[in-house]
């Protein structure tokens, strides 16, 4: 396990800053960008929690997801605000161009236990 912090917040320049108190996240605006493209919504957010899991490189703190439409369920993750903004724009353009985002996950049906 890495000694790197697990939780982060953002400073005024959108740089990740380690956070000791996870309750600060309930008051922060975590949205990087949201764009509607036809039936799809492309959403990019700050995750607050390092999703790199294995450590060893920069914390993975941002995520783009597509909700609805042909590429529903696609996601991509990034280390920095700048990467997240660029990734959001790239994903929006791919949806507009109707070109498949890289590594589109298969659609899964959720099954509830009775």
Image (cartoon, rainbow, N blue to C red):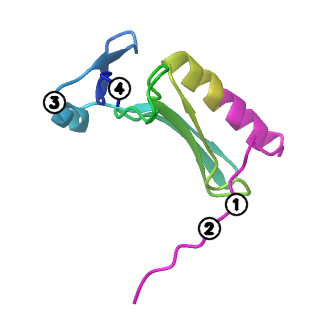
Within the image, what quadrant is residue 94 found in? top right
**Mark 3 vs 1, N-terminal side:** 3
Indicate yes or no whether the magenta region holds residue 104. yes
Q: Using the image as rendered, state which of residue 25 and residue 1 is in the foreground.
A: 1
**Cα–Cα span, label 3 and label 1:** 36 Å
Whole-percent x and y of residue 55?
44, 27
Residue matched to label 3: 21
Whole-percent x and y of residue 112?
45, 80
Whole-percent x and y of residue 60?
47, 28
Q: Residue at x 61, y 54 (%)?
A: 73
**Cα–Cα span, label 2 and label 1:** 6 Å
> Is the residue under label 1 in contact with that under label 2 (CB below 8 Å)?
yes
Helix, strand or loop for disc 4: loop
Q: Residue at x 48, y 31 (%)?
A: 62
Helix, strand or loop for disc 2: loop
**Which residue is situated farthest in the front direction here?**
1
- Residue stretch rendered in magenta on the structure: 89-114
Residue matched to label 2: 108
Of discs 3 and 4, which sits in the foreground? 4
């Amino acid at each position: 396990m890495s000694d790197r912090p697990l939780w982060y917040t953002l400073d005024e320049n959108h740089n990740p800053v380690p956070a000791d108190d996870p309750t600060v996240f309930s008051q922060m605006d975590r949205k990087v960008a949201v764009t509607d493209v036809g039936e799809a919504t492309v959403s990019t957010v700050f995750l607050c929690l390092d999703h790199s899991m294995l450590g060893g490189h920069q914390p993975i703190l941002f995520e783009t997801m597509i909700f609805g439409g042909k590429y529903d369920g696609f996601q991509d993750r990034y280390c920095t605000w700048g990467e997240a903004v660029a990734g959001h724009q790239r994903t929006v353009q791919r949806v507009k161009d109707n070109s498949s985002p890289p590594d589109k996950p298969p659609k899964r049906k959720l099954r509830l236990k009775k």
